[in-house]
Amino acid sequence: MPDHEEQGNINALASLLNAKGLDASDFIDVINALSNIKKREVEKQEKEEAKEEEQGLKIFHDKEFVIPTQQDCFIYKHGKTKSGRYYVRIYDERTKRVFSQSLRTTNRIEALASAQKIYFENKHRMKKGVKLTSITTKELIGIYLKDRAKLISKKPHTGITQSSYDTLISNLKYWENYIEYKGHKKTKLEDIPPEIAKGFGIWVKELPKSYYKNEKYGERSNETINHYIAAVKKMYRDIAIEEKYITMQEFPIFKYLKVPKDNAPKRDILEKEEFTELRKWMENKWCREKDIDELERIKRRVYGLYLTIQYYAGFRNKEILGLRWKDVSTIKTESKELQRVNRAMHIPAENSKTGKSRQCVAAVAYQFERIKAHYKKLGIIPDRDNFIFINLAKTKRGKNIPYMQPAMEKRLKSVIEGSGLKKKLDETGRHITQYSARHYAITDALMRGVSIYDIAVNCGTSVFYIEKTYSKVISTMRSETLTQGQGYHQVLKEREEKRGAAENAIKDALTDNQLNQLNLRES
């Protein structure tokens, strides 16, 4: 007979079955079904364990634990190979991670010694979740570049541009060369001493000038070298740390180079008179040379107009080369007179550095009309979707292919040298590039009294950047206005005032007759 407590449980179960509309037979069927399910699961698990054990017997021959008291590491001979070499296998129960590696020996004693060393070196790394698959610096760079290549996009701020990716390759090459120089070309990341990175910046700085094959100035600035360091650090953070190849204790210790807090423009510019002289030389001499054919003459004419448009509008190189005819329009709110002079140029988001579209306004209507006239001589009638500055080479004409930046830089170099302007630039230590046009346009607008806000909107930059970058140039070029009423200017003013007061006093003391004679003499 069941005791009082068991009888209570039976009664409770009977009440529950009645409440659900079930009887004892239904309950027995449910119990049997659950029993069958559990039995099948046990049988499945036993089969899997047997299969795993069978596979283990096929793979793990001559299995032997490295440390008898611990069963997370053992050596074995691979059952599917005939070399007879030993392997080591480490398993971490907490992270469920497995590490396996060939020991490159058939000697049992050597295998146990090597396995024990590997075990103690890597066990703590497994507990931290770090990968036991080690990689070299070159392999790290390869993984990172492959990862970054997936982000290449033509639209700004939606990834990285092809140009930025190419620069990244160049920057990381310095790090790869530095690691090789330090004798760690084949060293695994975790085995490279972190403090080695401290000397990277100085090493790049002290490289011979001949090393910089594509560098215009002969050596890298501290600011540029710091960009290299930042690129390498990002690579280590994004791949080495995030992908668990190393721990933070193994992260390289970098040391940035000091950069003076000078907000001077990063590009030199032409003076207004120099730009005017250059334009006149291009129009009157360069484009009228006798020993050139008509195609070359038109190419020169178009380049001259290209240069003028960039200098007036302050476009970035990519922005002006990406202009299409549909992007250029008159400004309907202006008077008819101004509509004959000004043009609004739309910069789409994908062609803008900031990733935002904008309207740029400049007095360049004449230049665009002249470009059309020159194209007409070649039988080219521009379509709305055509690039404005199309490549005029015979093999590319009609394919709507725009000029690339190197072609424009080559033209600029030619006119700088041909016009004799290079000598003046060399004497003043200035280096003019195609991008200098943007700095010229901003500086010229400031000198004409255009508000910084309007310039920022028109050129697609920030007020802060203009104030920071151009403040020194503005104060120098506007010295006359800024010094008005100061120092010697004030002395001259006071002398003039005293002289005028003295003359007035003398005139007051003269009789009317004497005053008339004085005025007559002065006239």
Image (cartoon, rainbow, N blue to C red):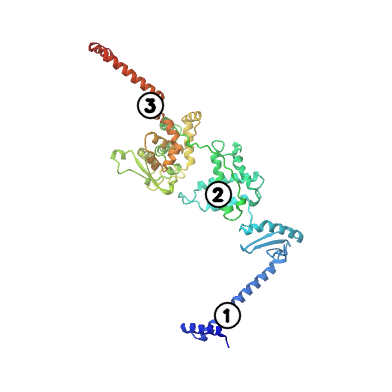
Which numbered dot is residue 26?
A: none
Position in image of residue 153 (x %, y %): 48, 51
Of callouts 1 and 2, which one flags the residue occurring earlier in the amino acid sequence? 1
Label 1 SS: helix
Q: Which residue is mark 2?
A: 234
For the N terminus, the image quarter is bottom right
Query: Pointers 1 and 3 in contact (CB under 8 A)?
Result: no
| Residue 90 higher or lower than 379, as above or below | below
Left of 125 or right of it: where is 308? left
| Residue 371 higher or lower than 156, as above or below | above
Front residue of this view, candidates 402 and 134: 134
Left of 2 or right of it: where is 117? right
Of callouts 1 and 3, which one flags the residue occurring earlier in the amino acid sequence? 1
For the C terminus, the image quarter is top left
Q: Which residue is mark 3?
A: 485
Amino acid at pointer 1: Ser
Query: Pointers 3 and 2 in contact (CB under 8 A)?
Result: no
Front residue of this view, candidates 471 and 487: 487
| Residue at 71% over, 57% down | 117
Q: Which residue is mark 1?
A: 35
Residue 281 seen in the figure: no
View extreme (front): residue = 4
Q: Nearer the viewer, mark 1 or mark 3?
A: 3
Amino acid at pointer 2: Lys
| Residue 330 higher or lower than 74, as above or below | above
Amino acid at pointer 3: Gly
Q: Marks 1/3: CA distance? A: 104 Å
Q: Marks 3/2: CA distance? A: 53 Å
Of callouts 3 and 2, which one flags the residue occurring earlier in the amino acid sequence? 2
Position in image of residue 217 (x %, y %): 54, 35
Label 3 SS: loop
